[in-house]
Structure formats: C-alpha cells, structure tokens
Amino acid sequence: MFTRLLVGLDGSPNADEALEQAVHLGLRFKSKLVVAHIKETHRLGRRVSDSGELLKRAEERVKDAGLQVETIVKHGDPDVELAALARDVDTVLVGRRGRSAPADVLGKTVTSLIRIAERSVIVCASKPSPMNSCAIAYDGRETAQRALALVARFASVTHSTVHVIHATVDPAMGSMIIGEAEAMLSLQGVKFVTHIEPGTPGAAVARVIERTKCDALFAGAHVGSGEGRRSDVRVSHAEEILLHTDIPVVIQP
C-alpha cells in the first residue's frame, strides 16, 4: 500500500503542504512520488504558473529526502487530469485549497477530484502530520467499510490504535453499526477504541480528535440520491469534518 503516491502541485501553499505530507508518507512506505502539475490557461491563453520551476523544486525536495520521484506536466482541467493519473498510483495527495479558491474549505478541484477519482484521495492539512495515530469516521456504508479496511492495513504498519468514531442520535443503532467495525478490526488483529458520539459528524470527530490527539482521519465517500453515477459521488460529511479539524483526511471511494 502507498508505494506510488501522486501529488498535485499548483504553486499554492496548500499544495506545498501536500508535497511535504507525501514525503512523510513516502519515507514510511518507501514510496515513489509522482509529482504532477496541470497547466491551466485563462480564456486568452495566458499560463497561470511556471511548471518547470515548480516541478524542479519539488523534484529536488523529494530527492533530498532519499525518495524516487517522477515529474509530469499535463494540460487541461486539474481534477480530470489528476483523476486519470491516479489510476496508476495508490493514492493522490492534494491541498485543501488551491490557487483558484483560497477562501473555501475545499477548493473546486479537490471537491471534484474526490467525486471522480478511483483511488483514495488524501486532503492534506496546513502542516505535515506523522500520521501515527489514526481515526475513522464510520457510518457503516460500503465506502466506509473500505475505508475501515484501509485504516486497518495502515495501522498494522504503524502499530497504532484505531479510533472508530460514529455520530448518531440513536445510541442503540450506533452500537450495532460500531459492532460491525469492531468485528472486522478484531479479525485483523488491530487494536481499536470505539466512540459513539452525539451530534453532527464534524463535531463528533473534532471532540474525539481533541481527546485522543489523533493525527490522521479516514472516511468513506458515498453515492448521493441520484442514479448511482460517479458524478453523484460526494464525500460523506467531509466539508463539515474539514471545518472542525486540521489533520490529513484520507477519503476512500
């Protein structure tokens, strides 16, 4: 897992943090980093950024860390091009906000990428995290189950305890859903602690992270109320969760 990491760079500080997070993760898993810059143009055709200098700095940073690196330049829409590149890697790392949406919790590219990517997307925080202590926002959905499997594998490498968080207004139903996660983690031999919390998922996650000092969060995406098309896929409560916490969030499709 995580042997090939794709990083999307656009020259923004948040993208730089995604590169640093990829280096942290790459050192742990001995990964190869694929650093990509997608050239966008204004309507008049003027280039937004200097991809050559941007990728050169990134390549030097990764090599200085002792990791293998490949750089790629593409033209087009960043979300579409990154999703296509992501098919050949294990996960893609992006900053929460890019150059085009500095005031939003999630930039337009990130929001779209999560909907269309076929690999996990790590939405990076404002500073790199060692990702030593993992939490998962678990709602029992199919994608949450895949996120649970991913965090179990991750925790087996980091030898950490997984904190399973479920927000609910019905503790009895919450216990049933959490029980599914407990059974799976027990079979995997992973240490875990469960948290059934009142309130919204974002607030629940924030409380548990504050108590436990977890430094990475896993969550599943899910299909909306439409026809089940990939275009209907959205992150389960991700924007709310991102409003409440500043740690890397791994979104599993």
Image (spheres, grey):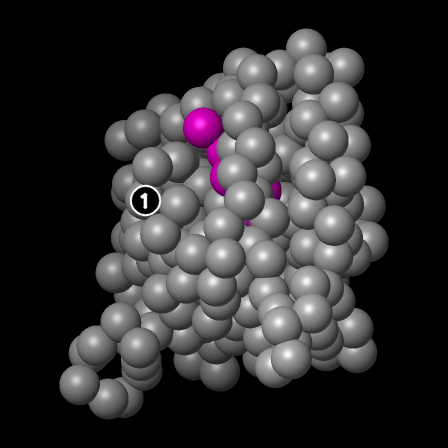
Residue 201 position within the rendered picture, expressed as x and y whole percent measured from the top left: 56, 73
Instruction: Give the class, few, some or many, for how many residues have Cα within 10 Å of label 1's Cα (few <14, many ≥20).
Output: some
Q: Nearer the viewer, residue 203 or 143?
A: 143
Main secondary structure of the magenta stretch:
strand
Instruction: Name the side, left or right, on which 60 lies relative to 142.
Output: right
Tell me: residue 151, above or below residue 117.
above
Residue 43 position within the rendered picture, expressed as x and y whole percent measured from the top left: 61, 82
* Residue 116, quarter of the rendered image: bottom left
Q: Mark 1: which secondary structure?
A: loop
Residue 82 position within the rendered picture, expressed as x and y whole percent measured from the top left: 46, 53
Residue drawn at point x = 39 percent, y = 36 percent:
89
Callout 1, which amino acid?
A: Arg
Residue drawn at point x = 52 percent, y = 38 percent:
72
Tell me: residue 169, above or below residue 195.
below
The segment highlighted magenta reads 4-8
Residue denoted by label 1: 87
* Residue 104, quarter of the rendered image: bottom right
Instruction: Name the side, left or right, on which 249 lies relative to 114.
Output: right
Q: Is residue 197 visible to us here?
A: no
Instruction: Name the side, left or right, on which 224 lies relative to 228.
Output: right
Examine the structure image and report whether residue 5 is included in the region drawn in magenta. Answer: yes
Residue drawn at point x = 62 percent, y = 15 percent:
67
